[in-house]
Amino acid sequence: MTDADLLARYYATGDQQWLGHLLERYTLLLLGVCMKYLKDEHEARDAVQQVFLKVLTEAGRFKIEFFKSWLYMVAKNHCLMKLRSQQGKRMQDIDNHAFAAPEDRREELLENEQTYRYLGQALAELGPEQQQCVTLFYLEKKSYQQVSDLTGYSLMQVKSYIQNGKRNLRILLERKLKEHTK
């Protein structure tokens, strides 16, 4: 059965076994996505379980047309949220353990951390198309063709969104850094 057939049966009956079949198909894909973002097998396996639960509890709220793409986005967003929640903890760790680094190195580390934070904020300020294409291309190391396949945009649109998004990111980041140094 195709993904669409399984989804149709799920929506018709409300029986979660059909979602279970879909999740079985994409377990390795989910693990790969989570490993890519979290870089730790144990955390990735936990994330896959959490994504499973999220899909089982929330799939009925959405009209899903392309399950694989939707599942990828759910997993990606889950991992990004997990990384964001850990980011604050890592910044505290840097502050708490900074005494181990020479003073000039400590300042450099804090500046880099601030730059990454500004980059995240600038990325969030891009339009959704630019944000999605830039994230897939630069952060997830996808090719133009892969970005096009994942988003449904033409190759020319993808190239344009990436080029304009990169330029807008640079402008936003420079503005944020300039405001910070004032």
Image (cartoon, rainbow, N blue to C red):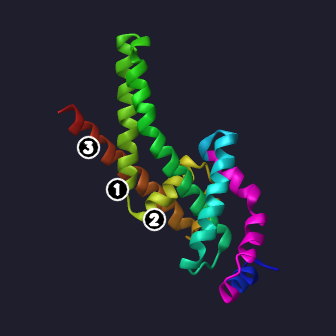
Vertical arrangement, residue 162 with respect to residue 151, above or below: above
Q: What residue is disc 1 on?
A: 125
Spatial distance from mark 3 to mark 2, Cα to Cα?
22 Å
Check if mark 1's residue and mark 2's residue have beta carbons within 8 Å: no
- Element on which disc 1 rests: helix
Tell me if residue 34 is in the magenta stretch.
yes
Looking at the rendered image, the quarter that the N terminus falls into is: bottom right
Spatial distance from mark 1 to mark 2, Cα to Cα?
11 Å
Q: What residue is disc 3 on?
A: 175
- Element on which disc 2 rests: helix
* Range of magenta residues: 11-36
Q: How many marks?
A: 3
Which residue occupies the foreground of this view, 106 or 22?
22
- What is the residue that sits farthest to the left in this orientation? 182
Horizontal side of residue 65 vs 103, given as left or right: right
Residue type at the position of mark 2: Glu
| Residue beneath the point at 48% across and 40% down | 86
Which residue occupies the foreground of this view, 17 or 134?
17
Residue type at the position of mark 1: Glu
| Residue beneath the point at 44% across and 60% down | 130
Q: Percent position (x, y) of residue 37? A: 60, 46
Horizontal side of residue 11 vs 130, given as left or right: right
Q: What residue is disc 2 on?
A: 129
